[in-house]
Amino acid sequence: MALPLEQRFWDDLLRNASDWGMVVYEQDWLYTEFLGLNATQTATGARKWLTQMSTAAARVGVTIQYCMEMARFVLQSSTLASVTQIRASDDYNPAGDSNCTPPACNLPVQSNTYYIGTTSLLAWALDLAPSKDSFWSTSAQPGNPYGGVAERYPAMQAAVAALSRGPVQVSDGVGYSDRELILRTCDEAGRLLQPSRPATALDAAFHRSAGVGDGPLAKYANVLPITATHTAIGDWKWAHILAINLAEPFTVLPTHLRPTDLGAGEHVVYEGTRVSDFARGVTIPACGAGDFRLYHVAPRLANGWAYLGELSKFVPVAEARTRSLRFDVSSVAVALAGAAGEVVDLTFLAPNGTLVSAECVLSAAGLGEVIVG
């Protein structure tokens, strides 16, 4: 093993990479290098290594992702402005855990390589985006290096990435991407449609895992089965609740969604076009990875309307799409952003309980507005 000792190495490497079009540099194998070298065990060796890397990145305007990082690297990044994201998941492997592949262990395929619900808490506390590792958007990838295995749950992988508020990294072979699935995470120009904070495990899930209170029961160890997040638009919040590998039904109540405070007033919960009142929560049935459940909670505005957003997206109300929302006694207006000429399909819940659909074609500037009433 080896690592550079001079600033000029990083300046040259990242300047060249920036010229090639690189915008994010991922430093992988961090803990392996740290533990495998004497130089990093000195009082200042590892800090010098990371500082030189960050300095060079700042000079050329690229950012850094830490991968296979220890907690000490995450904490050190708080002094390094170029570090904007960390790998929050284990290595992606469509055959299952890279270090625990059936039948050598009792975990099923895809048991927890997707899971980032706890590490995302640390990342977000330090203003870092948690990165779920890449995934295949289609099950079959001919010529793959994993012995011909298939990705059984591409939609689940995409949903976790979309709610992470980190990068969405598709690692398909050329010609084997599912465009429709990928577009559930972004607009037509590729801009991610994300919540305002990463999805993180419910406090109640920690309580159940630790045996100190009621909460959702996971099918497998080391996975907390329900994560939640929210999108903030003006004074309103929309919650997003994702359940994967939930062993038994669990009712998510408004109080379970902290730190998302939905505020006063009525709220509705919806899964697709199935809408109900959220005052008494929503009961999520037991589910796995292939039949994961994704719910959203929307505020009822003072005029009785509720804006449900783009039901085709994993985050139907996202900061990047919904620029603003306003209403009067009988109507709701939503200002939108996206790709030039993009067609945006929105859904609203009317005061009488019926669903109202509206379509908007964005301008050449990628802007538009929908008014219903």
Image (cartoon, helix red, strand yellow):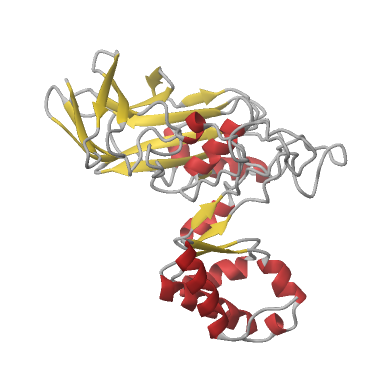
* Residue shown at the point (58%, 36%) measured from the top left: 175
Would you say residue 373 is visible in this rendering?
Answer: yes
User: Residue 155 at what x, y percent from top left?
Assistant: 57, 31
Q: Of residues 266 and 188, which is closer to you in this image?
A: 188
| Whether residue 16 is situated above or below residue 329 in the rendered picture | below
Q: How many labels does the image show?
A: 0
Q: Is residue 262 left or right of residue 259?
A: left
User: Residue 194 at what x, y percent from top left?
Assistant: 41, 43
Residue 208: name its quadrant: top right
Residue 349: name its quadrant: top left
| Whether residue 81 is situated above or below residue 92 in the rendered picture | below
User: Residue 271 at what x, y percent from top left?
Assistant: 45, 23
Quarter of the picture holding the C terminus: top left
Q: Is residue 361 left or right of residue 258?
A: left
| Whether residue 269 is situated above or below residue 44 in the rendered picture | above
User: Residue 355 at what x, y percent from top left?
Assistant: 31, 16
Q: Of residues 113 and 182, which is closer to you in this image?
A: 182
Q: Of residues 21 and 198, which is closer to you in this image?
A: 21
* Residue shown at the point (74%, 40%) measured from the top left: 96
* Residue shown at the point (49%, 50%) measured from the top left: 167
Q: Of residues 304 and 50, which is closer to you in this image?
A: 50
Residue 268: name its quadrant: top left
Q: Most extreme residue toward the right, as rendered?
A: 104
